[in-house]
């Protein structure tokens, strides 16, 4: 009986570990992609006033990245040190990028409405996020990652997306 229990526990751990590792790897890749994306966006001067001001990367909802996103705090983007902020309720936070977690799938429309003209780049991996007024949707097809961009929403927020990035994306009309 004891041997059977040990064998069962071993099989459960062996099955769960690869699934957990794959999910962790996916969000490590997405964190790196978010960092790279930040280099292809131009914010208005009012959003990043001086070089000492941090670049605020905000995560709304349950954080799927865990420590993978924390690694970005040792980096700079566009000459600004990256600071990560996590919260469950959006209320006028000072963000340059706002990643909306899938845990906010039912509520994110109201957040997008609140910030629609502010220079905040909105990102998510929620299906149809870019079609539903988000700016960049990170998606995965098989083992490949890609993204869709709602260019109209970015322009309304006075964000300029480089032509290089636009060529790699699916543009939402």
Image (cartoon, rainbow, N blue to C red):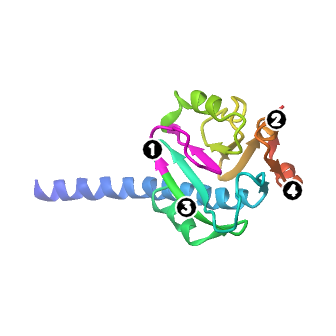
Disc on res. 91: none
Residue position for label 4 = 164
Disc 2 to disc 4, C-alpha distance: 17 Å
Alpha carbons under labels 3 and 2: distance apart: 27 Å
Sequence-earlier tag: 4 or 1: 1
Location of mark 2 (residue): 152
The residue wearing badge 3 is 83
24 sits left or right of 38 in the view:
left
Viewer can see residue 64: no
| Number of dots carrying numbers | 4
Q: Nearer the viewer, mark 3 or mark 4?
A: 3
Closer to the camera: disc 2 or disc 4?
2
Residue 72 belongs to magenta span:
no
Closer to the chain start, of discs 2 and 1, is 1
Q: Name the residue under label 1.
A: 62
Residue 9 percent across, percent down from the top left: 24, 55
Graded by Cα atoms within 10 Å as few (under 14), some (14 to 19) or many (20 or more), the crowding at tag 1 reads: some
């Amino acid at each position: 009986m004891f041997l059977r229990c040990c064998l069962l526990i071993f099989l459960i751990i062996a099955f769960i570990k690869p699934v957990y590792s794959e999910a962790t790897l996916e969000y490590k890749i997405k964190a790196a992609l978010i960092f790279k994306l930040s280099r292809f966006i131009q914010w208005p001067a009012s959003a990043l006033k001086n070089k000492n001001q941090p670049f605020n990367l905000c995560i709304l909802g349950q954080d799927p990245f865990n420590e993978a996103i924390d690694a970005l705090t040792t980096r700079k983007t566009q000459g600004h040190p990256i600071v990560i902020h996590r919260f469950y309720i959006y209320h006028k936070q000072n963000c340059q990028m706002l990643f909306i977690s899938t845990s906010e799938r039912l509520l994110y429309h109201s957040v997008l409405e609140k910030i629609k003209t502010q220079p905040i780049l909105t990102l998510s991996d929620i299906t149809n996020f870019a079609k539903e007024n988000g700016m960049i949707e990170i998606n995965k097809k098989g083992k490949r990652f890609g993204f869709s961009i709602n260019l109209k929403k970015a322009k309304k927020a006075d964000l300029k997306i480089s032509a290089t990035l636009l060529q790699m994306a699916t543009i939402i009309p």
